[in-house]
Amino acid sequence: MLPIYVDLDDVIASTVKAFIDIVKREFEKPVTYEQITDFDLKKSFQLSQIEYEHLFEVVHRPEEILNMDVIDGAIEALNMWSSKGHPISIVTGRLTSTYDSSLEWLSMHSVPFDSFTIVDKYSRPNMDNNIAISLEQLSDMAFHLAVEDSSAMAEFLSISMKTPVALLDRPWNREIELNSRLTRYSNWQDLGREVVGNNYCLTSNRFS
């Protein structure tokens, strides 16, 4: 049975909400979740380059990683899929420096998974190529389904890799054009019910 690809940030871990708290703490800038309409956090938080670089350093500290909450319904859905025999592949674009703290966070929250892979999804600096794989290497893999929040990755997976993608609805991905392999879901509860046995039901392009 093919594995299910599951992104980590804002799919399992409530990352942007943690970022909002950090931006308020570090820069005294109150920003609401619905205001994060661009995947580029520098734009969404209206940060200077110096502020953005500081934020990027802070959010990757182990203590900040370990302090992130779990998104409601994620673990229940993953446990259900795992119980039906679907291998769970956590595929993240986090910096390679977060490898150990990310695994510790997954263990802390009893997240079921069969593999953990860091992919250089966004050509970010400071990625250790001995740990991260490239998008080209990712494209050689096959998945039953992918769960993402990133518009760019949802398009890459659904169009380039021809993988069915469940896009969890987020303010920063609402402009994406859906396609026959790309379906939007409001939450994990709705998505979890549609993965049954070996079949993934693309029943509707929700919110389209």
Image (spheres, grey):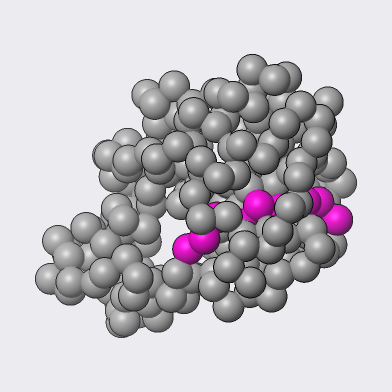
Residue 113 position (above or below residue 189): above
* 25 is within the stretch colored magenta: no
What range is drawn magenta here? 161-170
Residue nearest the viewer, comparing 197 with 171 = 197
Numbered circles on residues, count: 0
Look at 73% across and 53% down and name the residue there: 203
Q: Quadrant of the N terminus?
A: top right
| Left or right of residue 203, residue 94 in this image | left
Does residue 104 appear left or right of residue 116 in this picture? left
When the figure is inspected, residue 42 is found, relative to residue 103, above or below; the finding is: below
Q: Residue 35: in sight, yes or no?
A: yes
Asked if residue 142 is positioned above or below residue 164 in the image, the reply reads above
Instruction: From the top left corner, tell me how far across and down residue 148 is, in percent.
Output: 60, 53
Quarter of the view holding residue 160? bottom right
Quadrant containing the C terminus in the rendered view: bottom right
Q: Magenta: predominant secondary structure element? A: loop
Magenta segment: does it hold 165? yes
Measuring from the top left, give residue 33's x and y in whole percent. Answer: 32, 66
Which x, y percent locates residue 75? 48, 30
Q: In the rendered view, tell whether residue 1 sits above or below residue 91.
A: above
Q: Residue placed at 73% from the left, 66% from the top?
A: 155
Query: Image quadrant of residue 31?
Result: bottom left
Residue extending farthest to the front is 203
What residue is drawn where x is 39% and y is 26%?
109
- Can residue 154 be seen in the rendering of this structure? no
Residue sitting at x 70%, y 58%: 204
Q: Is residue 6 left or right of residue 201?
A: left
Q: Position of residue 206 (x, y in %)?
A: 62, 62
